[in-house]
Every structure is written in structure tokens, then in C-alpha cells.
């Protein structure tokens, strides 16, 4: 009997070890390369009126060190989706990494109305070298024209049928105390009756935008958590992150929208994804469904 019980314990122990090893293998070598395309339709009358027919693609948290299997797959999928506009919301390079491979990757992305990029906190980790994300090497005063880097600035992009889209890019070091002054100043540069597209690596500032603004705010940073966990654990595990907006689409109910992308890469010290695959997001726009009408 004692021998039988010992054998059962060994079998259980082997099963547990096998599950842990298998899960770790999957989380390191399989899911981080299983890039998904998530198509999101935003139902908002004003956004639809301004941007209908426009395909906006978001990438975030690339964390590039080299152009490898994952980067090549992302590039292939982006090309197949044929977006009108590409937005990249920060953490382009891995922490303390060179930007050379990042620029090579970004230059390979094509969209009808251009590629617009902001920096994340990992991009700021390289000291003075971070300048060469936005500026051409050897000419510190010459900003790159392709892709377009935005840093607490606004650009107006002409799109089809005489329309335009206004894009605001927010730097990762703009804090909560500085943001209201920044927003009040930049409001003077755009039409209050036209929605704006905001790129910010962090989502936390979205709550500070006045409720009557009409905008789509694109963020990243959280990686969607990298590992799917029950919601009650989020405040403990993701302390320091905006865990209330960990991933997905959010709305104020007044026309102020937020989308938090799960990102492409992982952190250097935790290269694991389980239940939170790398994400390319493609946005389209539709009218709001009227009460009493049918629709999906």
C-alpha cells in the first residue's frame, strides 16, 4: 500500500512538472510569435462622419532588438491589411537598445497617409541616443520625414474627399501636472467640432481630457498584462500600470474613446505571453446603433 501511494505521488509530481514546463515552453517560444489581428469597429456618429472609410492600424510595444521571426510576421500582416494610416504607440526598442533595427523596421511599413510614431519610456532609456529616433544620424537638426515622430505636437493629415485627420502625439515624460496646460494650449490648434486622434504610450492621461472632447486615444505600455490573470489580482500584479485600462476598448459615453493595445514584444526580463498574444489592431468606424434598431 505504501509503495502504491508513493507511486501515485510521483505520477502527480511528474504531471505537475510537465504542465509547468509545457506552459513555460508555450509562453516563451509559441504564443509570443502568434501575432493576432484584432479588428475593432467604433460606433460613434462624429468619428464616423469624419473618418468613415479610413482604416487606421495600431502597433505598440515592439521592443525590437533584431528583425526576427516576429517582426517579419508583423510586417507581412501589416502589408496584407493595406491600412490607410499606421500609428505606433511607443516602446519601439528594448530597454537600453540601439534604434538602428527599429528605424529599419519602421521604414518597411507602408500606408497611404503615412506612419506616425511616438516614443515610450523604454525609448527614453538610451540617453542622448534617443534623439536619433526622431532625427537623422549625423544631422541632429534634421527631423525624419518618414516615419513621422510626434512629441507633444499636432499634425494635420489630408485624407480623401477633401477631409483631414488631426493627430496629436504625446511624449512619455509629460506628467499629470503638466498635461492640463498642454491640452489647453493644443486645443487652440484643432477644430472642436472635428475629432482628433491621440497617440500616447500611457493611457493614464486619458481621464484628464475634458468629457466633451471627441477623440480616439491610442495607448500601449501594459502589454495586456502578458499573462492572463483574474481581474481581482490586477491591482497587486500590475501595480504602477493603468490596470483599470489594461487592454481593449473603453468609452466615456460622451464620444471620448480609449484603446489599449496588447503590444507586440515583451519585457527583456519576462519574455512570456500566456493568454495575451501579440496584437495588431485595425480600426474602422460606423454610426452609433439607434435604440430599437437591429445591428451587430
Image (cartoon, helix red, strand yellow):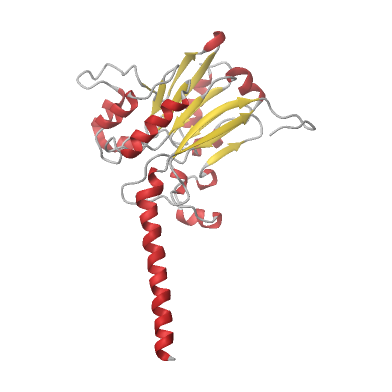
Which corner quadrant of the image does residue 208 belong to? top right
* Residue 267 pos. (x, y %): 35, 46
Residue sticking out furthest to the right: 292
Residue 284 appears at what percent x and percent y?
57, 26
Against 208, is 184 above or below? Answer: above
Residue 194 in sight from this viewpoint: no
77 left or right, relative to 159? left
Q: Residue sitting at 43 percent across and 41 percent down?
A: 278
Residue 191 or residue 132, whichever sits in front: 132
Q: Is residue 72 above or below residue 53?
A: below
| Quadrant holding the N terminus | bottom left
Instruction: Give the total number of marks visible in the rendering.
Output: 0
Q: Is residue 164 above or below residue 137?
A: above
**Looking at the figure, which quarter contains the C terminus?**
top right
The spot of residue 283 in percent (x, y) is 54, 29
> Hey, which residue is sitting farthest top in the picture?
162
From the viewer's perspective, is residue 12 above or below residue 42?
below
Near-viewer residue (144 or 57): 57
Residue depicted at 37% across the width and 24% down the height: 109
Front in this rendered view, residue 6 or 91 = 6
Whether residue 101 is visible to the viewer of this picture, yes or no, is yes
Residue that lies at the very extreme toward the left in this rendered image: 138
Q: Nearer the viewer, residue 1 or 119?
A: 1
Q: Residue at x 43, y 44 (%)?
A: 223
Left or right: where 147 falls relative to 237: left
Q: Position of residue 227 (x, y in %)?
A: 45, 52
Amino acid at each position: 500500500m505504501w509503495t502504491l501511494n508513493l507511486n501515485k505521488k510521483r505520477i502527480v509530481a511528474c504531471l505537475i512538472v510537465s504542465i509547468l514546463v509545457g506552459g513555460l515552453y508555450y509562453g516563451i517560444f509559441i504564443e509570443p510569435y502568434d501575432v493576432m489581428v484584432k479588428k475593432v469597429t467604433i460606433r460613434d456618429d462624429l468619428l464616423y462622419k469624419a473618418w468613415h472609410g479610413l482604416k487606421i492600424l495600431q502597433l505598440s510595444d515592439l521592443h525590437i532588438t533584431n528583425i526576427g521571426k516576429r517582426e517579419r510576421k508583423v510586417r507581412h500582416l501589416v502589408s496584407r491589411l493595406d491600412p490607410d494610416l499606421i500609428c505606433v504607440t511607443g516602446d519601439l526598442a528594448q530597454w537600453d537598445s540601439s534604434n538602428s533595427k527599429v528605424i529599419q523596421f519602421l521604414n518597411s511599413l507602408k500606408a497611404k497617409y503615412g506612419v506616425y510614431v511616438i516614443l515610450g519610456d523604454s525609448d527614453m532609456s538610451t540617453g542622448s541616443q534617443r534623439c536619433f529616433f526622431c532625427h537623422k544620424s549625423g544631422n541632429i537638426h534634421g527631423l525624419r520625414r518618414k516615419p513621422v515622430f510626434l512629441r507633444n505636437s499636432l499634425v494635420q493629415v489630408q485624407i480623401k474627399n477633401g477631409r483631414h485627420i488631426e493627430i496629436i502625439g504625446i511624449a512619455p515624460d509629460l506628467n499629470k501636472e503638466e498635461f492640463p496646460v498642454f491640452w489647453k494650449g493644443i486645443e487652440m490648434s484643432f477644430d472642436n467640432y472635428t475629432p482628433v486622434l491621440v497617440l500616447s504610450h500611457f493611457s493614464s492621461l486619458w481621464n484628464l481630457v475634458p468629457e466633451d472632447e471627441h477623440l480616439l486615444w491610442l495607448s500601449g505600455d501594459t502589454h495586456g498584462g502578458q499573462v492572463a490573470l483574474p481581474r481581482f489580482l490586477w491591482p497587486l500584479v500590475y501595480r504602477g500600470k493603468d490596470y483599470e485600462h489594461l487592454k481593449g476598448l473603453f468609452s466615456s459615453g460622451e464620444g471620448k474613446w480609449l484603446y489599449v493595445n496588447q503590444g507586440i514584444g515583451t519585457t527583456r526580463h519576462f519574455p512570456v505571453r500566456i493568454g495575451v498574444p501579440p496584437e495588431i489592431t485595425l480600426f474602422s468606424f460606423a454610426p452609433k446603433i439607434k435604440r430599437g434598431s437591429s445591428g451587430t
